Amino acid sequence: MKSIWIVDDDHSIRFVLEKALTREGLPVRSFSQTRDVLTALEEDTPQVLVSDIRMPGGSGLELLTTVKKQLPGLPVIIMTAYSDLDSAVSAFQGGAFEYLPKPFDLPRAVELIRRAQEESQREAVGEAEQVQMPEMLGQAPAMQDVFRAIGRLSQSHVTVLITGESGSGKELVARALHKHSPRAEGPFVAINTAAIPKDLLESELFGHERGAFTGAQATRRGRFEQAEGGTLFLDEIGDMPLDLQTRLLRVLSDGQFYRVGGHSPQKANVRVVAATHQNLETLVKEGRFREDLFHRLNVIRLRLPPLRERREDVPLLARYFLQRSAGELGVEPKRLSEAALQRLVGFDFPGNVRQLENICHWLSVMAPSLVVEAKDLPQELLATPGAHAMPPGGLSAEVVPLASGLTGTSAAAPLPLPAVPIPPSPDAWVAEVAREARRLLAAGEPNVWDVLTRRFEASLILTALDLTRGRRIEAAQKLGIGRNTITRKIQELNLDA
């Protein structure tokens, strides 16, 4: 296990942290100045770096900048005095994992370092996965079927039809088919037939001769000629006008075409890969798509599953998109907390992979800290929970313990309550609260408001602490409250007992 590195010119700070972390079974290495840290980095790397912000011979911010260049995924905790809040802001801008204000509460400091260590371990797993990152991502069985099909088609020139919802990655599949085909050395040319006006689409596909129409001042090669020897990807083929469908059928049948206004046939040595989000069989029945063209295109069909059918791929895709967005923006990659990740996994993503990519880019710009909590997610994820949302851990939670009930007269006298089933609908628990309120009111219980409020708060806090294995700072973040608030509430509700 890699060590936790402590950097502080104050011997007492180093001593206290060393002893506390050693008791936790964590290996520790201490330094009194930044120069020694930089020397040590030439031979070793830490799992977490904890550094004071003001030291003789070099500041913690300078060390942060240097270390982040070498180890961008390393969690760095900056220790700072309360008067150094401006420096704390600079620390976050420099990519610090968190800052630890002095004087600090030792258990809280250890808890924070523990959380950073866990984040470091997750980051290491993510980097290992990233090394093996293919051009397409997917561990779900449906995606593995797509990968196997691409492999089987790797030595073929056959026409392929890709079906799938908008944003599911059909062009990526088309590019993979090209990359792993005998035509890989040739060009890959893509055109979205739904995005080009009908009057221009014919010229875009087949080119035109000089003078073929007003504005045609020179001969122009179309996409078929541009893709010579390679692959032509026709996206949204279901939106192609019927007269152009006839011309496309002729190219696929005869292997040649005419430019607009041309009289000499042009040979087409092109593999066609088409894609659509529409049901072509239905379009054929409605007379909006030629049946003979459908059969020409539908030699091999690949169905690309929507993201809601491959939820297990969301974490891998999200990590990849966050890293890519960070690289484009020149910032530290954001990381998702467990609660935020579960919210993403449970979302239905009507826009599929493209929507997830956009969300990750939004988070790279807008999320307030390096670790993205559930409350930091865009409004569409917070306002509409996915129909398949699951609790952290991915298990179906049927029963959770409600915190010890507290009377309104004594916070030190907890009343044990039985485990309460999670209600089957979002509003059922409100009905349970109403029934309990009615019972207490009917019994003449004083301070009903305080009694139920304390029970509710205690239940929330104990559930969050159970989820975070007792780590108060992380529990507070998951609940959306401050660190001081959760500590005060724990004391007020006698939850330490």
Image (tube, grey):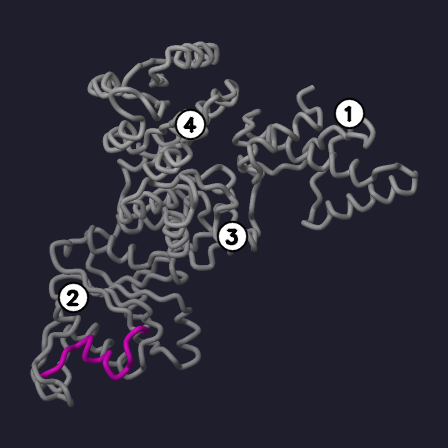
Q: Indicate which label's residue lies in the foreground, 4 or 3.
A: 4
Q: Determine which residue is flagged by label 3.
A: 381
For numbered disc 1, what is the local secondary structure? strand
Query: Which residue does the image show at 41% across and 69% down from the upper left?
Result: 278
Query: Which residue does the image show at 56% across and 55% down from the upper left?
Result: 384
Going by the numbered disc 1, the residue's amino acid type is Pro
For numbered disc 2, what is the local secondary structure? loop
Residue 159: percent from left, percent from top:
25, 63
Dot placed on the residue nearer the N-terminal end, 4 or 3: 4
Alpha carbons under labels 1 and 4: distance apart: 34 Å
Dot placed on the residue nearer the N-terminal end, 3 or 2: 2
User: Looking at the rendering, in which quadrant would you find the N terminus?
Assistant: top left
Q: Determine which residue is flagged by label 4.
A: 116
Going by the numbered disc 2, the residue's amino acid type is Val
Q: Residue placed farthest to the right in the image?
A: 443
Q: Which mark is residue 414?
A: 1
